[in-house]
Image: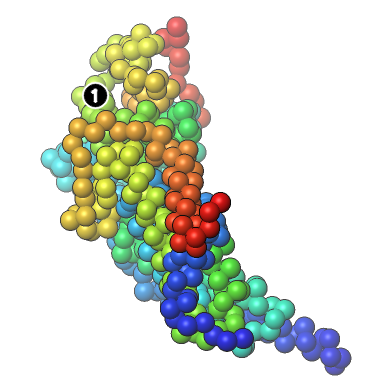
Amino acid sequence: MNEGLRESLRAGAQLALAGLAAAALLAGTWALTRERIADAEQRAKLQALEIVLPANRYDNDPIADAVQVRAPAWLGSESATVSRARLAGQPSALVLDVVAPDGYAGPIRLLVAVAADGSVLGVRVTAHQETPGLGDDIEAGRSDWITRFTGRALGDPPAPRWRVQRDGGDFPQFAGATLTPRAVVAAVRRTLQFVARHGEAVRAAEPGATLSFDDAPVADDAP
Amino acid sequence: MTAPTPRAILEYGLSSGNVGLVQLLGLCPLLAVSNNAVNALGLGLATVLALTATNTAVAGIRRLTRRDVRIPAFILVIAAVVTSIELAMRAWLPALHAVLGLFIPLIVTNCALMGRAEAFASRHDPARAALDGFATGLGFLWVLLALGAVRELVGEGSLFAGAGHLLGLPGLELAAAGYPGFVPAVLPIGAFLALAGLVALRQGWRLRRTGATS
């Protein structure tokens, strides 16, 4: 074997060893942290859920009783998780993980809880990149704007007023930021329309199922 | 080559060779995560841990790796160590991990890590390398924390807001009631201005100390 080849092989063997050591370290850390990470993620999901979903509304495990919904025209993402809350075996609410795709600085993620009667139980923003000080009043920690949806439903206010005030609706915008609240109002409204149209199918599906809906909301009140 | 004294290593990392203020390395995390003191402290501590661990590991394998494959070997080590830190953070500080998110894996790309691995750790014993990593990390941490504190104070009128929720240290939180806030401070422009101010301050201090007049 010539010298050059031997050198290359030795270098390769060293790199392989370094790779092996790195892999061993990662495998060890993963084994140590895996359960705690799963626990922490489960807890975080439950905490988020508890904020929009009053505790007296369910007695099942809504996270375990979830389905995936592919309805991009309604819920804004390729696949949305819908957790199903039940009380004494009866469907009591749906918690939808929806996206308002048209925020000022990219998509805004929302958690929307809709009661069986079609009214909003609660809405929270879970992730956004809106401008600090202008658009971030959609965060519950910054203003109570997001609580204005609670108790509302399709028809309350009437369809033409399910908009920000700037567009002739009932929901106030923020000084200097209209696009952000406009996107959130539209996303919540689409979510309610989705539940009205497809809620039955979502409630009836097996836990863990994936449902696809290719239709889109109708622009019933185009200006 | 004579080995530097621990004192010299600390001084270099914290001041004369500070990655943030003097070398201007790792600016991406420095500018992006210094929007408040808690984020800054979280990322700073993670960076100290990562730098100390990677420097020690690199010094440990420095005699085993040939010159021509040392860079990829160091990259493997750094990536593995940082990923381990990220996993630990997800397990024990999930709320902070959710906020810092992408910036934890991005510690891998902080030039300070590769820079110290190559410039220092690959030429010195593990003890000195660990100290150098710690000092460099601490130097990065204090600049990050100073920026974060200034930007949060000016921008929101608070200090360490969210420390209870994110770090489990509610005792740190301070807030000035009724402060109207100054948004630009927490926007990217505030980061650049605050860093420029800090660099200028340090420069002024250095010039005065060395007696230079112009």
Q: Is residue B86 visible?
A: no
Of A74 and B26, nearer the camera is: B26
Q: How many marks?
A: 1
User: Where residue B166 sits: x, y (%)?
Assistant: 28, 54
Residue A196 seen? yes
Instruction: Name the one closer to the observer, B14 or B189.
Output: B14
Above/below status of A1 relative to A94:
below
Q: Is residue A195 above or below residue B193?
A: above
| Screen quadrant of the N terminus of chain B | bottom right
| Amino acid at dot 1 | Arg
Residue B205 percent location from the top left of the image: 44, 56
Instruction: Estimate the x, y position of residue B83 in percent, counting from the top left.
Output: 47, 66
| Residue A221 locus on image (x, y percent) | 41, 9
Left or right: A223 as drawn, with respect to A170 = right
Q: Residue furthest right?
A: A2
Task: Name above or below for residue A16 compared with residue A188.
Answer: below
Query: Camera-side residue: B14 or A75?
Result: B14
- Residue hosting label 1: A148
Residue positioned 35% across, 16% down in the render: A164
